[in-house]
Amino acid sequence: MDDIEKLLVERGLINPETLDLARLEAAKNGYSVWLSLVKLGYLTETQLMVFFAQESGIAYINLSDYRIAPEVLHLLDEHFCRQNTVIPVCKINDLLYLACSNPLDPALVDAAGKHCGLSVEPLFATTAAITAALDYYWRLNERNFSAGQFISRKNPLKGVGFWRESERLFLSLPVTVAVRDQGIALAPAQQLKAQAQDISQNAKAIGIACPVFLPRGVSLFMEFDGLKRPGARQEEFCATGEIIRCFMLKERDYFLGVTLGELDPVLRQRLLEKAFTRNTA
């Protein structure tokens, strides 16, 4: 049993007997243990992709959360997408975010980058979701679930550290987030209900828990719903910002690190008044 398979057991996703049966089935039919686990009904494809995402540090996304613009879709041709089970999701500046059934394959990511002439940021998505999206926007052979062999527990993939100019204060405040970047479109709307979780002491950066993956570089408009009051100016409960990091906490739960634009003095004061340190929570 290798380390990554052992983790499935340690996490309680399967038991050792189930894994042994899946390994026998895989050996008999000549495909991976991962595909065997799904085929035998011990795990869903989504469970497996979320597991891979959590272990690798690469986000899992639900493709139905997004509307893919035609100009983004056609950055890669249909044959390449179907052959490799990938689909472009959005383009932010010169970076293409690509949903993949195996985003841990460096050769695939490199080929996609050369194909479209852009830097590529891979994301996990299920084969079924990618195929459905390809069919919707423009047949599928069975794909092996080969991401597991690329994950190393000794050198796990890490995201870029969240920029911090000062210590963080904890925050618990509902916020409506609106995407202001034309490079990404959400379905059915551009507004998301989220939760502010922390803020820097100088109020220049904020952390937000969000139900959808949003890539770095995306501009946001934020309304702090808990600060709205009759007669208040919009500036007293609204702010703009830019995402500098997004990582997955669990399925459909992401953390956004956001640098804030110039804040209205009243909003800045009220946000810091709502903040607290861990030992005063």
Image (cartoon, helix red, strand yellow):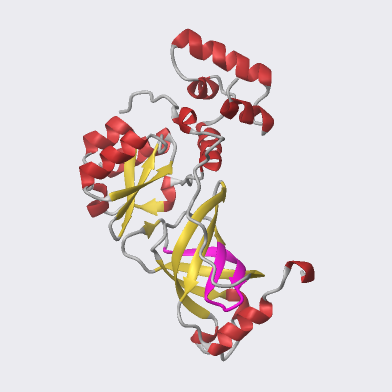
Image quadrant where one finds the N terminus: top right
Q: Residue at x 46, y 82 (%)?
A: 262
Q: How many marks?
A: 0
Residue at 38% over, 34% down: 105
**Residue ranking furthest to the front:** 154
Instruction: Tell me residue 78's x, y (percent).
Output: 23, 38
- Which quadrant of the structure image shows residue 110? top left
Q: Is residue 202 left or right of residue 146?
A: right
- The image quadrant that residue 18 belongs to is top right
User: Overall secondary structure of the magenta stretch?
Assistant: strand
Task: Give the residues in magenta.
Answer: 190-208
Left or right side of 80 for 46: right
Q: Is residue 172 left or right of residue 116?
A: right
Residue 191 painted magenta: yes
Placement of 79 over or under 178, stated as above or below = above
- Whether residue 202 is in magenta: the answer is yes
Between 77 and 134, the one lying in front of the other is: 77
